[in-house]
Image (tube, rainbow, N blue to C red):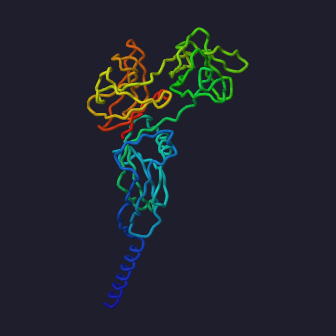
Amino acid sequence: MNKIKSLLSIFAILLVAVSCEEETYDPVIKYGDGPILTSSEAGGETFLLTEEEADNELFSFSWTQADFGFPAAITYALEIDDAGNSFAGASEIASSSGFSYNITVGELNSLLTSLEYPTGTETPLEIRVKASVSEYANALYSETFGFNVITYSVKLPPIYLLGDATDAGWDNNTTLEAPYMSSGKYGIAAHLKPNAWLKFIKTQGQWAPMWGSDGTGDAFSGKLTYRPTEDDTDPASIPSPSVEGDYRIDVDITNLTYSVYKLPDVIYLVGGATTIGWDPANGLAFTKDGVGKYSLVTTLSTGNGGMKIMAGNSGAWAPQWGSDGNGNSLLGKLSYRAGDADPDPAEIPEPSSAGTYKIEVDFSEYTYKITKQ
């Protein structure tokens, strides 16, 4: 009997030892609160990114420390994904042990471009903070920060306008930039002197490659001649119009053509989103801010249609500018209708909410920009 009692005592001691061993190697993590994310900007807004503001700060994020229930080295990752995707395809913006991160316009644009998000299109996104300590512990997450963003495409190099018809003269070091529009196509708004000459070059400070006239065109349209090197024949110059003023000049270096039309001193806004509706004889006048640049601050509504820009208040529907069909209510490219026989361009979209807006038109970049005031 005593021997049995002894065996039972030994067995009980072994059970306690095993129990203690399990407790030592299987701790229970008591999860506390996840990080609390705050932003310098309000959620739900739409942010238009521009190359000119690439170095500017867009968001300043900060967050509180996550609580895993025990002392640990915590890594925080700032993640981004499509809104409503539950971060199934999340991409990491940054990772650190700190509690803040600032994102510039250019940094976010580069990230979204590398992820093949479309440029010039409004995209809904979400950002959150992921806190983790190891692969054996579940991560803790913050609430999401939702916003909309419109990214930009990086500009391709321009070509350059010069000549005694321009303010730059014939100095190939002080030429005027003609921005890239699309494959082979460039354009510029420039002040031209009458009965003078102009050409285009590819590189400042060099006389070739160069584009001039084939000698058969006039001041408003014609064929180009290409000069690849300085050893090739110098082409004729393109003539300027007989009336001094601001002009839009377009060149197609693939099809070797050019076209020129005069820009009015005043342009006018009409449309269902405006206070005057679709009345081409009563448009809202823009202020001219520079060569090819105009602006207007006005009240816009929603639910009544978009807008167009008229070259005059004569009541005629041409010349006019609308959207190229790819823009949105904040930014887009213009499309020109020279006469009634030309296709009617798409409307510039109405804003997402009624209010006071500043509308800016740039006939060198050939863009419109709409900003809520």
Front residue of 110 and 271: 271
Q: Position of residue 204 (x, y in %)?
A: 65, 29
State which quadrant residue 194 falls in.
top right
Residue placed farthest to the left in the image?
303
x, y (%) of residue 120? 43, 34
In the image as oriented, which residue stretches furthest toward the bottom?
2
- Residue reaching furthest to the top: 216
Residue 221 x, y percent position in the rendering: 53, 13
Residue located at (38% from left, 44% from top): 125
Above or below 340: residue 285? below
Foreground of the two, 153 or 351: 351
The quadrant of the picture occupied by the C terminus is: top left
Front position in the image: 62 or 337? 337
Above or below 15: residue 177: above
Q: Residue furthest right?
A: 231
In the picture, measured across the screen, residue 237 lies left or right of residue 28, that is: right
Horizontal side of residue 255 vs 32, given as left or right: right
Quarter of the image that includes the N terminus: bottom left
**Residue at screen point 47% across, 21% down:** 263
Residue 3, quarter of the rendered image: bottom left
Would you say 234 lies left or right of 1 here? right
Q: What residue is shown at x 37% (from left), y 27% (from top)?
A: 285
Looking at the rendered structure, the number of numbered marks drawn on it comes to: 0
Relative to residue 69, is residue 79 depicted above or below?
above
Instruction: Give the camera-side residue of 197 and 185.
Output: 197
